[in-house]
Image: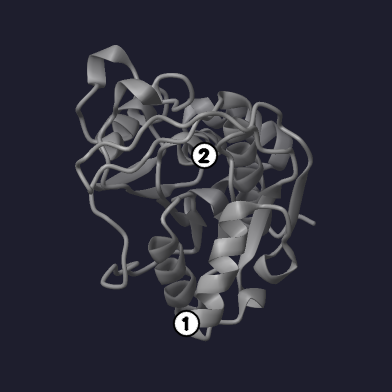
């Protein structure tokens, strides 16, 4: 057993640590929420992590994304996160896939759990449909942007959400696609969103208007998702 997992062995026992080492989790989106999910899973001893994200590290990521730093701006987030994990874990096998998730995305073989930490509705929908078909457990992050407080985190299904703009649009897309929102397990942050004057959209149509965000709700949401995954994989109630 790797030395960095000594305290997990004390906490959980050697058998459970060995079980986690055999598990594979795919993290879709390793930005704000996803970087915390990935970090917590790696430090908890999940043996194989598949990181999927098409983006590169930007200056605007520095306030909340764990892998981001001035020295890696412009590099693929998945590659930087993989290097970060290697700096503290000899146990985790990390696969970095720099690609955009849409209907053509293939989850691959041997995945035990999927964490949806992306903010595009098309990507979320694709993951929900593919994991449901394959019978793979999925946990999906709802909105963390436009918040400065952690608030209360609620674990529920998408059909039971309210007050979250992202969840509302997601439910609408489910109805349009004929997909049952009861099949999507989510973590929702109940803290109120803040009103502010958003930056003007650039003329480049491929550039999305950025949303203001802070590390507090982003971090706690990511850690909660990782906690859920580890407890589910170990069947701890």
- Tell me: residue 234, above or below residue 1: below
Gap between marks 1 and 2 measured at Cα: 26 Å
Q: Is residue 46 left or right of residue 230?
A: left
Query: Which tag is nearer the camera, tag 1 or tag 2?
Result: 1
Disc 2 residue crowd, few under 14, some 14–19, many 20+, Cα 10 Å: many
Disc 1 residue crowd, few under 14, some 14–19, many 20+, Cα 10 Å: few
- Tell me: residue 6, above or below residue 208: above
From the top left corner, tell me how far across and down residue 99 is, in percent.
Answer: 23, 53
Residue sitting at the far top: 70
From the top left corner, tell me how far across and down residue 220 is, in percent.
Answer: 65, 34
Question: Would you say residue 155 is visible in this rendering?
Answer: yes
- Tell me: residue 102, above or below residue 228: below
Which residue does the numbered mark 1 point to in the structure image?
A: 177
The residue at the point 59 percent across, 28 percent down is 6
Q: Which mark is residue 73?
A: none
The residue at the point 52 percent across, 39 percent down is 33
The residue at the point 29 percent across, 26 percent down is 58
Which one is earlier in the sequence, the residue at label 1 or at label 2? 2
Which residue does the numbered mark 2 point to in the structure image?
A: 33
The C terminus - image quarter:
bottom right
From the top left corner, tell me how far across and down residue 123 is, in percent.
Answer: 39, 62
From the top left corner, tell me how far across and down residue 226 is, in percent.
Answer: 59, 45
For residue 134, which quarter of the picture? bottom left
């Amino acid at each position: 057993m790797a030395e960095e997992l000594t305290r997990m062995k004390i906490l959980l026992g050697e058998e459970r640590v060995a079980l986690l080492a055999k598990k594979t989790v795919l993290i879709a989106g390793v930005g704000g929420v996803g970087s915390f999910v990935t970090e917590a899973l790696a430090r908890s001893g999940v043996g194989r992590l598949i990181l999927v994200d098409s983006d590169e590290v930007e200056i605007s990521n520095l306030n909340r994304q764990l892998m981001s730093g001035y020295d890696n701006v412009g590099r693929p987030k998945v590659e930087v996160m993989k290097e970060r994990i290697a700096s503290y874990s000899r146990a985790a096998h990390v696969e970095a896939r720099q690609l955009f998730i849409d209907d053509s995305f293939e989850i691959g073989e041997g995945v035990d759990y999927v964490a949806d930490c992306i903010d595009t509705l098309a990507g979320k929908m694709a993951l929900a449909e593919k994991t449901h078909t394959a019978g793979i457990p999925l946990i999906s992050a709802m909105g963390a942007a436009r918040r400065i407080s952690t608030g209360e985190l609620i674990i529920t299904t998408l059909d039971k959400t309210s007050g979250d703009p992202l969840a509302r649009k997601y439910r609408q897309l489910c109805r349009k696609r004929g997909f049952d929102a009861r099949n999507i397990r989510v973590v929702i942050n109940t803290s109120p969103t803040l009103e502010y004057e958003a930056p003007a959209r650039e003329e480049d149509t491929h550039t999305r208007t950025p949303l203001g965000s802070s590390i507090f709700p982003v971090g706690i949401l990511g850690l909660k998702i990782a906690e859920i995954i580890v407890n589910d994989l170990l069947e701890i109630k």
